[in-house]
Structure formats: structure tokens, C-alpha cells
Image (tube, helix red, strand yellow):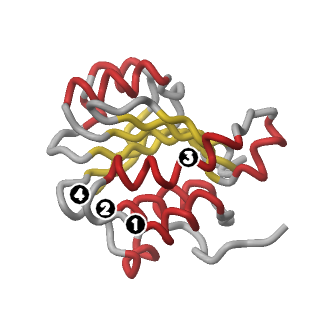
Amino acid sequence: MGFFGTSMLIRADVDVTALDIVRDAGGTPDGGWVGKDGWRFARVHRGDPLTAEHVRAVADQVNAPFLAAYVVDSDFVEVRCAAPGMSVLRFVLQPLYAADYDCPVDSHAQEAAVPYLLRWAGEGADEALLRAAVQGCLRFAEDSVVRLAAAIGAITASDLRDYTFGPIEDIHT
């Protein structure tokens, strides 16, 4: 059995695990770090996934870009993100495995994810790294969230191995 939980990225000086919206979803805080350029990462083990409404509410409450990535059994990740003035986008990391769980993958949302994230993250995001994060497949899905963090500029790509559980090279199935 793999990891189930929510990894979150926010570009603000706030502990998202202390927000009522996040606490009400349940689970146990399970680590976090402060990244580059005002980004913060937090992870909650177990708990319920944050809905689009939750993600919108956090982004509006903190007035900052917010991303909630629900990891399912270390196989795939359902991502929701929003920022003030931007709609909520839902897409999937490691979509190949989502079908095994009957999780819908919207091809239009998958294609929209990279341009959306470039705008959402602002300065520091890297289009090629974003594309690899959205389209790639790693051994552990939770590592794909960390790769996404590097792609938006929250950490440097050279530091990826310091934050991942397994290899960061794509696997082929």
C-alpha cells in the first residue's frame, strides 16, 4: 500500500496546515519546507482531498497561488490549483495510472495545465520542466508533486533528489 495524502504549494508566508479549511479535511501534517521566492510546501498524510471550492477558498483567503495535490496510493495525483483572479484548474499527474482507479482524466485540462501553471506560478516557472512534470511518470506519484514544485520554481531542479523518495527519471510501462 502506498501513500495517500495531500501535498500543497502556496506562494505566501503561511502554514496551510493551520488553516481551518485544510484542518477540516483531516489527516496528519507530515512535513513541509520553505522554498525559493516565497513558496512553501506542506504535506498531510491521509485526510480527504481538497475540493475545487476548498482550493478557491484558500487562494482567496491568503490572496496567493495555491495548489493541492491529492496522492492516491503513490500511483497518481489529482491536482487542483487556483490563484486570485484565476479559475480553478483540475488535472492529473501520472495520468496513465489514474484509469486503474477509475479517475477521470480530461485531455483538455491536461493540455491546458502547462500554460495555466506558467501564468499561475509567475516568474521562475520553466515550461519544459512543467511539461515533463505534467506528462511524465515516476515510480512514486508523491515525487511527481516535488518535480512539479521544481518546475514552478519553488525549488531548484538540482535539489530534486533532496526531496524525493525514489529516482526522478521517468519510468516506462
Comparing 53 with 43, the one in front is 53
Residue 106 in picture, x, y percent from top left: 70, 37
Q: Secondary structure at mark 3?
A: helix
* Residue type, mark 2 in image: Ala
**Neighbour class for label 4 at 10 Å: few (<14), some, many (≥20)?**
some
Residue 117 in picture, x, y percent from top left: 42, 51
**Neighbour class for label 1 at 10 Å: few (<14), some, many (≥20)?**
many
The residue lying furthest to the left in this view is: 13
Q: Secondary structure at mark 2?
A: loop
Res. 125 image quadrant: bottom left
- Residue 50 shows up from this direction: yes
| Residue to which mark 3 is pinned | 112
**What's the CA distance linking mark 2 and mark 1?**
5 Å
Q: Residue at x 49, y 35 (%)?
A: 89
- Residue 4 shows up from this direction: no
| Residue to which mark 2 is pinned | 154
* Residue type, mark 4 in image: Val
**What's the CA distance linking mark 2 and mark 4?**
8 Å
| Residue to which mark 4 is pinned | 34
Sequence-first tag of 3 and 4: 4
Sequence-first tag of 1 and 4: 4
| Residue to which mark 1 is pinned | 150
Q: Nearer the viewer, mark 1 or mark 4?
A: 1
Residue 13 in picture, x, y percent from top left: 14, 45
**What's the CA distance linking mark 1 and mark 4?**
13 Å
